[in-house]
Image: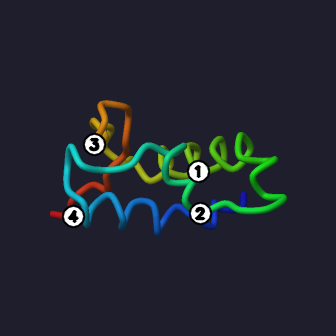
Amino acid sequence: MRESQYVDDYLNENARRGTGQGLTIGSYLAYKLSGKAREYAGKYAAALLAAVLRRNAIEGRSKNGGVAYYPRKEA
């Protein structure tokens, strides 16, 4: 199964921002996608969500109260 090309960048961006300040998947993709790719934003979002869940990311709140995902801290 192919991994979303955005999963590492998305989780790293939310880790950098900190819990409660991260981006939702939709907001993140709105910044990243342009041109023809925007027509397929739903498919990109579904693939990114699946990849994030496979990584066992932690669900939390975004900056504006939506659902964002944060990487698990390695012990």
Name the quadrant of the C terminus: bottom left
Residue 30 x/y as whole percent? 58, 52
Q: Position of residue 3 (x, y in %)?
A: 64, 61
Q: CA distance from mark 4 to mark 1?
A: 21 Å
Disc 3 to disc 1, C-alpha distance? 19 Å
Quick one: label 4 or label 1, which is nearer the N terminus? 1
Q: Amino acid at mark 3?
A: Lys
Q: Position of residue 20 (x, y in %)?
A: 21, 43
Q: N-terminal of the two: label 4 or label 2?
A: 2
Q: Residues within 10 Å of mark 3 (few under 14, many from 20)?
A: some
The answer to whether residue 75 is left or right of residue 69 is left
Question: Where does label 3 land, which residue?
Answer: 63
Q: Are marks 4 and 2 in contact (CB under 8 Å)?
A: no
Q: Which residue is at 21% across, 64% downward?
A: 74
Evaluate if marks 4 and 1 touch, with contact meaning CB atoms under 8 Å apart.
no
Element type where label 4 sits in the image? loop
| Rendered view: 2 above or below 24 | below
User: How is the model colour-coded?
Assistant: rainbow
Task: From the image, tell me which residue sits under label 2.
Answer: 32
Amino acid on which disc 4 is placed: Glu
Residue under label 4, please give it: 74
Q: Nearer the viewer, residue 68 or 55?
A: 68
Q: Amino acid at mark 1?
A: Leu
Mark toward the viewer: 4 or 2: 2
Kindly report the distance in space between the C-alpha atoms of the residues bearing marks 3 and 4: 24 Å
The residue at the point 63 percent across, 60 percent down is 4
Which mark, residue 48?
A: 1
Q: Residue at x 44, y 53 (%)?
A: 55
Observer-side mark, 3 or 4, equals 3
For label 2, the SS is helix
